[in-house]
Amino acid sequence: MSSHSEPEAPRPRSALECHLDEAVEALSFDRPDWALQELTAALAAHRGAGQPNPRPLDVDALERDVRRAVAGSASSDCGGEDVQAGASLAVVEALVFRACDLLGAHPEGPADTRVAPRPAGVARRDALRLLAAGGVATIAACSPAARRTAPVAAGPAAPTGGAPAAASATQTAGAGTTTPAPATAVVRAVTELDGLHWPTSDPFLFCAHHHDDYPQGNDAMGPAASLDGRQLGRDFDESRPWRMYHGADVPGFPRHPHRGFETVTVVRTGRLDHADSMGATARYGGGDVQWLTAGGGIQHAEMFPLLSEAEPNPLELFQIWLNLPASDKMVEPHFTMLWAERIPQVRLVDAQGRTAVVTLVAGRFDGAAPPSPPPSSWASRPDSELAIWRIELEPGASVRLPEVGVGVDRSLYLHRGDAAVVAGTRVGALSRVELDGPGVVDVAAADTAVEILLLQGRPIGEPVARRGPFVMNTSAEIQQAYEDYRATQFGGWPWAGDAPVHARDRDRFAIHPGGRLEEPA
């Protein structure tokens, strides 16, 4: 396999880019009214940015047409079923992709991201600094607030808390003998995490962390609580203890399409009900993982049924979007379940009795290997060195992450606990730590227990075009994905309603395409 270019330093997507993404996503949910709201906001963001546009007359014409569509939809109830299925939806679709072409497609912009080659003879860390200084664009998740990234100076800081001492140049192996200490990686940057969506690096597209303290459930497995004041269908208010997301009765994400990437969904607490256009269905949670290759196109629904009517129904999950290389973007969709009982956990106990537990969703560690990923996944290529690990450390406990190949990217997400020490650098709660170099990495909890998500992989190193639920290599492929979805429905929808949930008394199971039943061992 050919070598890959070094990725550039990630940057948050602009407000304009986020609004264009949301407009395409709104179309995928058959909501032209939401799409028009996002187009209006995208145009305002474009004007507010004050950047020169080579086609100002076209932008003026687009604004006029959007205003006309908004006025027309207001008088004809654009959100109604009859209008959604008729000409108004076609008009809004044309406006959305006109705006994407006019405002969101740039030679080095997020709609068509280019990965810059690494300068010959330049060290990895210096190459990353050069790329960042040059302002090369990259794709990252949208965030309601600006993230603060602190570059970290070369060389480890003095350990604090329960961290192991920094490795010396040599270590004593026996009387009168020494062995070289292992090479160590360093911290390149520490980024504060904001919002539901966390920034990632190639080959990952983003990571969503859903943590909702849902109340007791009602007869329909929705919340037994008032929904007054919520924008049902688009309830993402992070100031509340729980959200409905796109659900109207049951929280979650009703039927929607994907193409060109994979979703890896790790449900720690609560339950998730899955249904898709291949005929697969499942209920999973409590540490289970679903790995879904969207490939050439799939529809699925992801609902969060509140099963208990007597007790609260807390939910915590990660959904990780993993890119596919161009050669695999149009493969057949593939549905995989990794049950918690089959996902290995490596438990390490130090001399003081402090415990570290590493749960392996993908990637080997300490001789343990998780179940195989889907066959067309980037993770199935051995030289991708892709790993998804959950690391839990008791106060003062530590773990050493092994060496990786040159060019493999690693990020640690400290999402629970007060502080940890990573490669000699103390980092606080809700932080992303980007590592530099292929050496070992010592990670230790400080005074409280911590939980960390590790995402690791060799970059694919190809252009990335992302709009809403589609991830391709060019903007033209994004529009083609949407047109194909409208024409074929990516296999149709065999389920009653857009937000199906299973019977309350049915616990964890999966039915694969073709009808094969699978249950946890």
Image (cartoon, grey):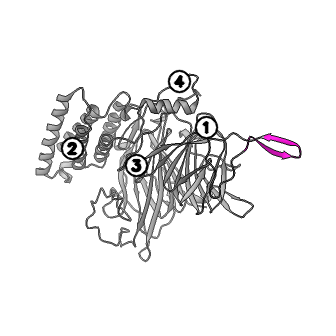
Residue depth check, mark 1 versus mark 3: number of the one nearer the observer: 1
Residue type (three-letter) at the residue carrying disc 4: Pro
The span picked out in magenta is 168-179
Secondary element at tag 3: loop
Quarter of the rendering occupied by the C terminus: bottom right
Asked if 59 appears above or below 430 in the picture, the reply is above
Of label 4 and label 1, which has the lower sequence position?
Answer: 4
Residue type (three-letter) at the residue carrying disc 2: Thr
Q: Which mark is drawn over residue 11?
A: none
Residue 440 rendering spot, x and y as whole percentages = 66, 43
Residue type (three-letter) at the residue carrying disc 1: Gly
Residue 420 rendering spot, x and y as whole percentages = 58, 55
Residue at image x 70%, y 49%?
366
- For the residues labelled 4 and 1, the Cα–Cα distance comes to 17 Å
Of the pair 274 and 416, the residue shown nearer to us:
416
| Residue that extends furthest to the front in the rendered view of this protein | 158
- For the residues labelled 1 and 3, the Cα–Cα distance comes to 42 Å
Disc 2 target residue: 40
Q: Which mark is drawn over residue 119?
A: 4
Of label 2 and label 4, which has the lower sequence position?
Answer: 2
Residue type (three-letter) at the residue carrying disc 3: Ser
Q: Which mark is drawn over residue 437?
A: 1
Residue depth check, mark 2 versus mark 4: number of the one nearer the observer: 4
Disc 3 target residue: 277
- For the residues labelled 3 and 4, the Cα–Cα distance comes to 45 Å
Q: Main secondary structure of the magenta part?
A: strand
